[in-house]
Image (tube, grey):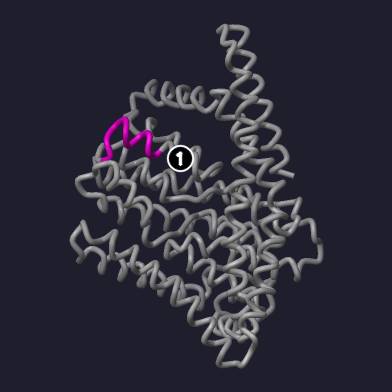
Amino acid sequence: MVLNYIWIAFFVIAFIVGMVKLVFMGDTTIFPAIVDSTFDTAKSAFEISIGLTGMLALWLGIMKIGERAGLINFLARILSPVFVRLFPDIPKGHPATGSIFMNIAANMLGLDNAATPLGLKAMEQMQSLNTKKDTATNAMIMFLVLNTSGLTIVPVSILAYRAQQGSAQPTDVFIPILLATAVATLVGVIATSIYQKINLFNRTLLLAMGAILLFMAGTVWGFMQLPPDQMNTVSTSITAVLLMSIITSFIVAGLWKRINVYDAFIDGAKDGFTTAVRIIPYLVAFLVAIGVFRASGALDWLMDGIKWLVASTGCDTRFVDALPTALMKPLSGSGARGMMMEEMSTFGADSFVGRLACLFQGSTDTTFYILAVYFGSVSIKYTRHAVACGLIADLAGIIAAIVLCYMFFG
């Protein structure tokens, strides 16, 4: 229901802004631009879905091998003590637990190509437990908030973009991004736990969070020992090795269990194709609404208004120039990436605005895109508190990014 109101709001605001520009400013090009954006973004949504088809077929095929080989159930049994408290609605040892863990691990390690198919598999498994098929469960919402908060240990793509833009030290945003995304995730989990009345002061959960923090601290320490120019190369290599390790280990496990690995892969890949087709309408709906909102100039007006308000209080307005990336990120990953690149190009990769744009890009994820794709894949219409908790996590990440940028880069 919330997504319905947000979707309508994008079109209504775009129409109002367009009419103001046409009537009062004489801009006769505004409505043709808005209409053109509907066709362009609809085409883009379809291309994204087609692009996802190959990845979904590959990773759901690999997951099917792991499922039949017993690896997913093995992961579920190991993680049950922690996940049964964070996801109390999922039965102990359910295969969804293993899929959730693999998705979260893939996101943390920057394995984007693997994370989405694994997440869609987890949603499918959680939907099998859902008694109200059109309404999001508590477990689904907690899972999506963990995704939308964007917890990533190694932001490989951002470091690469900074290097392309001529940054003297592309890796100087590494620690601030890690801290900002950790804040977003922590706040998102706390907000969702309050809604769902989950007790986070549990010894098992506290030990698990402590272990994650130690792992993150160890990763940061390890990367800080590397020369700046080697960090991106090493992180990219680690990512590639991890991806191939996952694929190979699942295949070997299938051979060990004497299952027909090829047939298992084909069965899973078929599911990937049908899932990709199923999410097309949801992607078209939201990307067209976002495109219309941007083309109308409503985002530019919002930025100008924020800058005026900040300036009227006498505060430093430098951070406002990077806000387009922050506001675009929950709506569109490619749009936010374009904003980040534009801000680095305009102000400089090593400027305050350029660095803050990178922190915004790395501290949160594409909330509405994730909600549309993940809920759309299992035909969820009523999202309950998912949007609110996801946006709370985004806001926490944005605030943390601004504070950390002033702390680290003045």
Query: Considering depth in this image, is 374 or 43 the residue closer to the camera?
Result: 43
Query: Which span is picked out in magenta?
Result: 340-349
Q: Nearer the viewer, residue 290 or 47?
A: 47
The relative height of residue 272 versus residue 208 in the rendered view (above or below) is above
Q: Give the prevailing secondary structure in the magenta stretch.
A: helix
Q: Is residue 30 left or right of residue 163?
A: right
Whether residue 346 is in magenta: the answer is yes
- In this view, the residue farthest toward the right is 132
Magenta span includes 141: no
Quick one: SS at disc 1? helix
Q: Name the residue: 44% across, 42% down.
A: 337
Which three-letter amino acid code belongs to the residue tagged 1? Ala
**Vertically, is 139 above or below 316?**
below
Query: Quick check: 192 above or below 296?
Result: below
Name the image quarter holding the C terminus.
top left
- Left or right relative to 104: residue 6: right
Q: Identify which residue, 76 or 289, lies in the foreground.
A: 289
Relative to 183, is 165 above or below? above
Say which residue label 1 marks.
Answer: 326
Task: Kindly give the residue lying farthest to the front in the view shown.
Answer: 262
Q: Residues within 10 Å of mark 1 (few under 14, many from 20)?
A: many
Residue 312 falls left or right of residue 72: left
Q: Position of residue 135 (x, y in %)?
A: 76, 56
Name the image quarter holding the N terminus: top right
